[in-house]
Image: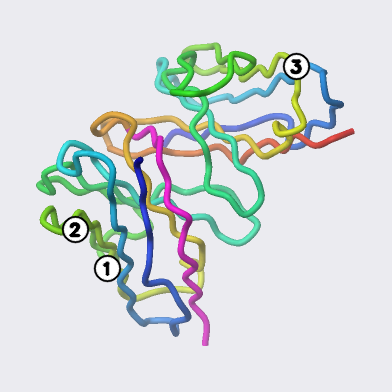
């Protein structure tokens, strides 16, 4: 059974940093890209970042470029999202999501989400 | 940047009725469009990919159509569990990304 489990969310001050983790199981981890998608309270979905199966390629939405960094540890079946210089507008539930097929940007399995709140 | 516009914002229907949801892209996305269902407090669920292909385990009452800039998600006969918010999403290989529409809420009339 495919499972994705996010952790690392919490309350952080503007300008602060946070690292999210996404622990994956139930599929061949290195064969699929993993994405982060966020949802601000009461709002729609926004794709944030993706990392290829090998970890060699990474992609970001323009609003987080230079502030967020995605990585993966294949030995731990885990993807990370390092978030720096956080802003109030980054407040959201962050989901990790597996590609339906590699770099398809369609997401067939999602975690339960972790809430990031940026506030003073 | 491609923008997806969904309509209507809210659809009020009764169980057993047919639901027709629209998604319009600001420029052609070929057939690279997906539909998701999201219920309160839950993660989204992939329903349709590449405009008309049902994802694994999705009931046949869900169908997708369209290409280019105009797409439709049809639920042939609404079940009680189908009342939710539906998002369309386009995929792009360059720049690599997956942009979502703003959502359509299907509510019980």
Label 3 chain ID:
B
Quarter-wise, where is residue B55 in the image?
Answer: top left
Q: CA distance from mark 1 to mark 2?
A: 8 Å
Label 1 chain ID:
A
Q: Which residue is mark 3?
A: B77
Image location (x, y in percent) of residue A104: 30, 30
Going by the image, does B82 lie left or right of A107?
Answer: right
Which of discs 1 and 3 lies nearer the camera? The answer is: 3
Label 2 chain ID:
A
Give the residue at x 75% y 23%. Answer: B78
Q: Identify the secondary structure beneath mark 1.
A: strand
Please report contact status of discs 1 and 2: CB closer than 8 Å, yes or no: yes
Going by the image, does A48 lie left or right of A57?
Answer: right
On the same chain: label 1 and label 3? no
Q: Identify the secondary structure beneath mark 3.
A: loop
Q: Which residue is mark 2?
A: A71
Which of discs 3 and 2 lies nearer the camera? The answer is: 3
Q: Is residue A115 magenta?
A: yes
Q: Work out whether mark 1 precedes mark 2 in sequence or the reverse, and give the earlier one.
A: 2
Please report contact status of discs 1 and 3: CB closer than 8 Å, yes or no: no
Q: How is the image coloured?
A: rainbow
Q: From what the image shows, is residue A62 above or below residue B7? A: below
Image location (x, y in percent) of residue A66: 25, 64
Q: Nearer the viewer, residue A101 or B67?
A: A101
Q: Which residue is mark 1?
A: A82
- Extent of the magenta region: A105-120
On the same chain: label 3 and label 2? no
């Amino acid at each position: 059974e495919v499972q994705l489990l996010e952790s690392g969310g919490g309350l952080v001050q503007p300008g602060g940093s946070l690292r999210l983790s996404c622990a994956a199981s139930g599929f061949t981890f290195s064969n699929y890209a993993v994405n982060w998608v966020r949802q601000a309270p009461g709002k729609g979905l926004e794709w944030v970042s993706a990392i290829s199966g090998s970890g060699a390629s990474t992609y970001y939405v323009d609003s987080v470029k230079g502030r967020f960094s995605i990585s993966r540890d294949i030995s731990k079946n885990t993807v990370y999202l390092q978030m720096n210089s956080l802003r109030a507008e980054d407040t959201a539930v962050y989901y990790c999501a597996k590609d339906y097929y590699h770099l398809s940007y369609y997401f067939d399995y999602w975690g339960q989400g972790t809430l990031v709140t940026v506030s003073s | 940047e491609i923008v997806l516009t969904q309509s209507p914002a809210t659809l009020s229907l009764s169980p057993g009725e047919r639901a027709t949801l629209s998604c319009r892209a600001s420029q052609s996305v070929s057939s690279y469009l997906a539909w998701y269902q999201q219920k309160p407090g839950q993660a989204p669920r992939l329903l349709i990919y590449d405009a008309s292909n049902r994802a694994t385990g999705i009931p046949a009452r869900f169908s997708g159509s369209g290409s280019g800039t105009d797409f439709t998600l049809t639920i042939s006969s609404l079940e009680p569990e189908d009342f939710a918010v539906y998002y369309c999403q386009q995929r792009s290989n360059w720049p690599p990304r997956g942009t979502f529409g703003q959502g359509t809420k299907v509510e019980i009339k």
